[in-house]
Amino acid sequence: MKKRYKLLIALLFIVGSILYILPNHVLPYTILQPQRVQAINTLDTKNRPYKNVEVLTKDTLKLKGYFVKSSLDSTYASIILVHGIGGCKQHFTDLAITLSNKGYDSWLFDNRAHGESEGQFSTYGYKEKEDISAIIDKIKNNNPMSKIGIWGNSLGGAIAIQAIEQDKRIEFGIIESTFTELNQIVYDYQKRFSYNIGLKWICDLSLAKAETITDFKTSQVKPINSVKNITQPMLIAHGNKDENIKFEYGKALYKNLASRDKEFVEVENAGHYNMFSTGGENYKNKLFNFIKKQTIKKEF
């Protein structure tokens, strides 16, 4: 009997320790510190001219990026391309080449705490929206009359939404496969990695701890609220088989978007990572025609 009692006490101690350590010392850093990656720069492999550029953020971090100029005589707009969690600027180099061929300048940056950019922590748009404004300052210094658009994928979409709300110099946006609220998507990911067992209280504790680690108000990262204040033209796209971020989130963002000039594109059978390949030319044409509508009159 005493052995069983001691075993039970030991087991409770171990479980209690794990439940304390996870939300206080493991999960907050998992949320705040995505892995840093670099990918193949197709601008190099396809011999396309570009410039390495750098932007200093409001809190004095250096963001590393590429500037890809329009290959046409005219430049119709400058488009900021914003990658997802654990991504990097190289993930958008093929798209930058396509946009260059169509007459657009592209600005690709590693988000803070990603790739070659400085910073320890990702804040899911809370600080990154200010980073976007710093990028716009640089674009305007380069070309004061340029129209500004933004194209964000996954986390990049959430960052873009918050930036569009704050900085009215952004004249249009394309948002792919993003979430509605940070606390909800953290809970969704926790369930997905725990065989659909939901531990909401652990997620809430982890986010609360994340706020103490860095200057980060997690409760304010709510793209679903931001879209209610956005009047600029927006296209929101989502795959209806998205395994990471629910398709319904894309629909909710569109429904709540205040803009009168808005489009929603459902990509049939697309998951989180294969929107372009699954959607094919039809999907690409919808995106590029949306950009054309905001910038030039003639067809691509």
Image (cartoon, grey):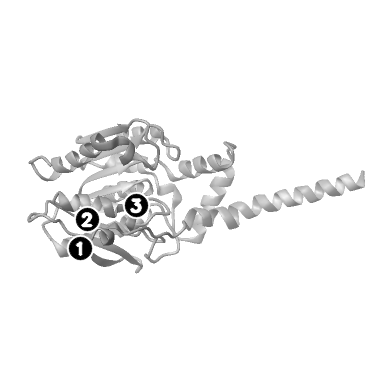
**How many angstroms separate mark 3 from mark 2 (CA)?**
13 Å
Give amino acid for label 1.
Answer: Pro
* Quarter occupied by the N terminus: top right
Q: Please name the residue that numbered disc 3 is placed on.
A: 83
Q: Please name the residue that numbered disc 1 is placed on.
A: 49
The number of numbered badges drawn on the structure is 3
Q: Nearer the viewer, residue 53 or 1?
A: 53
> From where the camera sits, is residue 109 visible?
yes
> Helix, strand, or loop for circle 2?
strand
Q: Answer left or right for 1 relative to 141.
A: right
Give amino acid for label 2.
Answer: Ser
> From where the camera sits, is residue 258 visible?
no
Residue at position x 27%, y 48% in the image: 151
Residue at position x 55%, y 43% in the image: 193
Query: Any mark on residue 106, and which?
Result: 2
The x, y position of residue 51, in whole percent, is 23, 66
Disc on the earlier residue, 3 or 1: 1
Give amino acid for label 3.
Answer: His
**In this rendering, which labeled residue sits more in front, label 3 or label 1?**
1
Q: Which quarter of the picture shows residue 131?
A: bottom left
**How many angstroms separate mark 3 from mark 1 (CA)?**
21 Å
Disc on the earlier residue, 3 or 2: 3
The x, y position of residue 69, in whole percent, is 17, 59
Residue at position x 76%, y 48% in the image: 12
**In this rendering, which labeled residue sits more in front, label 2 or label 1?**
1
Taking the view exactly as shown, the residue that stands out farthest to the right is 1
